[in-house]
Image: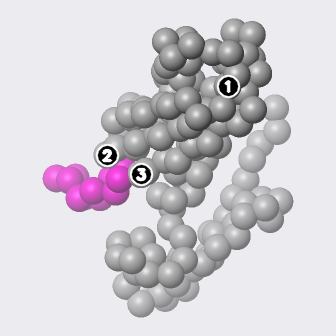
Amino acid sequence: MPIRTASARWEGNLTEGSGTVKTGKGGLQGNYSFKSRFEEGEGTNPEELIGAAHAGCFSMAFSKGLADAGFTPTSVETTAKVHLDKTDGGFGVTRIELETVGNVPNIDEGTFQKIAEGAKENCPISRLLSPGAQISLSASLA
């Protein structure tokens, strides 16, 4: 399997400095700062990038699980809400809320929920993050 890369550059001190992040092949690139991370400033932040990775990974894993069960999804749309909280040990990602909507013809609600839960438990990014963060899932049929 290929090794994926991303990079970041930061200039200046923590509160007044700024930086850029980008993926290895340039698919994503963005500016970040103290304000974009800890306040409501313009730009992105590491937690949004984790959320994008988790939403993407979950959506692919869910689509695979659906296909393996004989259902071809028209679409799977997922949002990940990443919570960065101050704890006794400093700041940390404590919770991620996955919200997904699947347009999946001919599936019943119970099967849909079971496959969604399996994707949440088994996508590589969930497995990476779940030892340190609580991951919840809200899944609904379109």
Locate the N terminus by quadrant.
top right
Q: Residue 61 placed where, x, y %?
A: 65, 27
Q: Residues within 10 Å of mark 3 (few under 14, many from 20)?
A: many
| Residue 58 at least partly seen | no
The kind of secondary structure element at disc 2 is strand
Q: Name the residue under label 1.
A: 104
Q: Which residue is drawn at 41% across and 51% down?
A: 82
Q: Residue at x 69, y 58 (%)?
A: 6
Q: Residue 106 placed where, x, y %?
A: 68, 15
Q: Residue 27 placed where, x, y %?
A: 78, 61
* Residue 29 against residue 130 in the figure, above or below: below
**Residue 138 shown left or right of residue 64 in the figure:** left
Q: Are marks 1 and 3 in contact (CB under 8 Å)?
A: no
* Residue 27 against residue 57 in the figure, above or below: below
Q: Residue at x 76, y 21 (%)?
A: 72
Mark 1 vs mark 2: in front: 1
Q: What residue type is labelled 3?
A: Val
Q: Reading the chain from its start, which is encountered first: label 1 or label 2? A: 2
Q: Mark 3 points at which residue?
A: 82
The kind of secondary structure element at disc 3 is strand
Q: Reading the chain from its start, which is encountered first: label 3 or label 2? A: 3
Range covered by the magenta-colored residues: 83-93
Q: How crowded is mark 1: few (under 14 residues within 10 Å), some or many (20 or more)?
A: some
Dominant SS in magenta = strand
- In this rendered view, identify the residue nearer to me: 2 or 106: 106
- In the picture, the disc for residue 94 is 2
Q: Which residue is drawn at 75% across and 32% down?
A: 74
Q: Which amino acid does label 2 sit on?
A: Thr
- In this rendered view, identify the residue nearer to me: 89 or 99: 99
* Residue 97 against residue 115 in the figure, above or below: below
